Image (tube, rainbow, N blue to C red):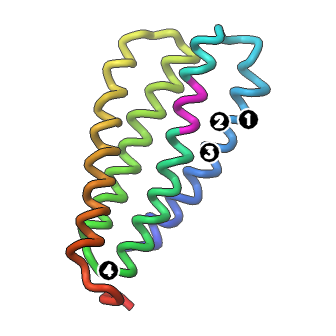
Amino acid sequence: MDRPLFAAGALSAAIGVAAGAFAAHGLKDRLTPEMLAVFETGARYQLFHALGLLAAAWAAQRYGTDTAVWGGWLLLLGTVLFSGSLYLLAVTGIRWLGIVTPFGGVAFIVGWVMLALAALRGSPGAAG
């Protein structure tokens, strides 16, 4: 179960780097400074939570708990909702997309809490 999370984390990091480069080079002259900052916030949070996905994969292996796996999937859901809505808001200007963003933030928070619980409740070395 930790391999899909690790792969998702690595791919999310790659997409986050690409999104940041796209913002810096492809969108700089096309978006207002405000919307460029919105896009860059999406990329920054995607990169942070890509590392969280890698941590979730490690925790699932280390502690042998489904809590870490669920935490990782919540981080991935948060990335799609939070960063995805910010990307779309920035490039389309459709303001109602901002309604989706907080749901992604909640998924991030719950995902991180689940990773903390996995560390506190799991057995070190349980899965390997």
Q: Is residue 14 above or below residue 99?
A: below
Say which residue label 2 marks: 19
Q: Nearer the viewer, mark 1 or mark 3?
A: 1
Q: Is the Cβ of the residue at disc 1 closer than 8 Å to that at disc 2?
A: yes
Q: CA distance from mark 2 to mark 3?
A: 6 Å
Q: CA distance from mark 4 to mark 3?
A: 28 Å
Say which residue label 4 marks: 63
Say which residue label 1 marks: 21
Residue 120 coordinates in the image, percent (x, y): 24, 72
Magenta residues, start to end: 39-44
Q: Is the Cβ of the residue at disc 4 closer than 8 Å to that at disc 3?
A: no
What is the three-letter code of the residue carrying label 2? Ala
Residue 123 coordinates in the image, percent (x, y): 26, 85
What is the three-letter code of the residue carrying label 1? Ala
- Please report the residue visible at 26 percent of the width from the left and 59 percent of the height from the top: 114
What is the three-letter code of the residue carrying label 3? Ile
Say which residue label 3 marks: 15
Q: Nearer the viewer, mark 1 or mark 4?
A: 4
Let me know if residue 55 is in the magenta part: no
- Direction from residue 80 to residue 33 in the image, left or right: right
Q: Earlier in the sequence, mark 1 or mark 3?
A: 3
Which image quadrant is residue 2 in? bottom left
Q: Is the Cβ of the residue at disc 2 closer than 8 Å to that at disc 3?
A: yes
Residue ranking furthest to the left: 121
Q: Earlier in the sequence, mark 1 or mark 4?
A: 1
Q: Is the Cβ of the residue at disc 1 closer than 8 Å to that at disc 4?
A: no
